[in-house]
Amino acid sequence: MIKKPTNEKMQEVYYSNQRVEMTGFIPEGCHRILDVGCSEGNFGALLKRSRGAEVWGVELSKEAGAVAASRLDKVFTGDFSAIIGQLPANYFDCLIFNDVLEHFTNPDEILARCVSLLSPGGYVVSSIPNVRYIGNLVEVLIHRDWEYKSGGILDRTHYRFFTQKSIIRMFSGAGFEVLRCTGINPTRSFKTWLLGWITVGHMADVKFLEFATVAKLH
């Protein structure tokens, strides 16, 4: 019998995840980076080592933020929407939102407010869960269910749900040019490949758990 991970174990993995797959989406030349929802600072620490970047973090959890403070250059704990005004204007080359924007009730407004934090031509990099992911479609279309859970796409703390198209629309509406919006963390299921083939690519996106986006300030 396979044991399901406990909520405590899932939280431990969430806060300690290094997100190595996102490093390739950080544009070259970004030396002052703000990691929003930095967790324990593992991703930011990786960027400091590999890019020699100055990395600040914002983290809602005081416990995770305390760990991040030992790894990053500066860390703020609390609600990002309340912290934006405390951050230096036009300072950062890149803002990172790894699995964060879906936790805001109004991510469009958050992105618009972030414009003031970026240097001219600055970037926003994000990973956002794909609501069209095959596992989620099976729940809705086959099992006729929409059960909120402790993690994943239907995480209880997710306020917003996105497709690739709606992600692009959100960034464009906030004043950014979307340079990349690429599916990541795909399932290797043959059925998913077959579904994409039968629909002539129309449902090829269902294999991706998330989309990684690189957007540049106009």
Image (cartoon, helix red, strand yellow):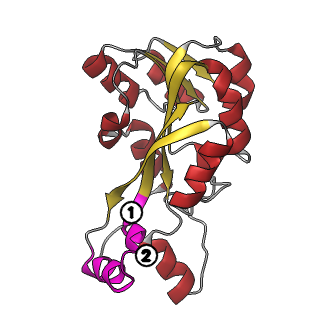
- Please tell me whether residue 141 is drawn above or below residue 56 in the rendered image: below
- Please tell me whether residue 33 is drawn above or below residue 181 in the rendered image: above
Residue at image coords 62%, 58%: 156
Which quadrant holds residue 148?
A: bottom right
- Look at the numbered disc 2 and give the secondary structure of its residue: loop
| Quadrant where the image shows the C terminus | top right
- Look at the numbered disc 1 and give the secondary structure of its residue: strand
- Magenta span: predominant SS is helix
User: Residue 134: where, in percent of width, then height?
Assistant: 43, 74
Q: Is residue 181 magenta?
A: no
Q: Is residue 203 magenta?
A: yes
User: Residue 86: where, in percent of width, then height?
Assistant: 70, 14
Name the amino acid type tagged 2.
His
Which quadrant holds residue 210?
A: bottom left
Residue that carries the numbered disc 1 in the rendered image: 208
User: Residue 147: where, in percent of width, then height?
Assistant: 60, 73
Badge 2: residue crowd in 10 Å (few <14, some 14–19, many ≥20) = few
Residue at image coords 49%, 61%: 130
Query: For the magenta stretch, what is the residue range?
Result: 189-209
Residue at image coords 69%, 22%: 84
Badge 1: residue crowd in 10 Å (few <14, some 14–19, many ≥20) = many
Which quadrant holds residue 179?
A: top left
State which tag comes first along the sequence, 1 or 2.
Answer: 2
Taking the image as drawn, is residue 195 in sight?
Answer: yes
- Please tell me whether residue 65 is drawn above or below residue 138 in the rendered image: above
Residue that carries the numbered disc 2 in the rendered image: 202
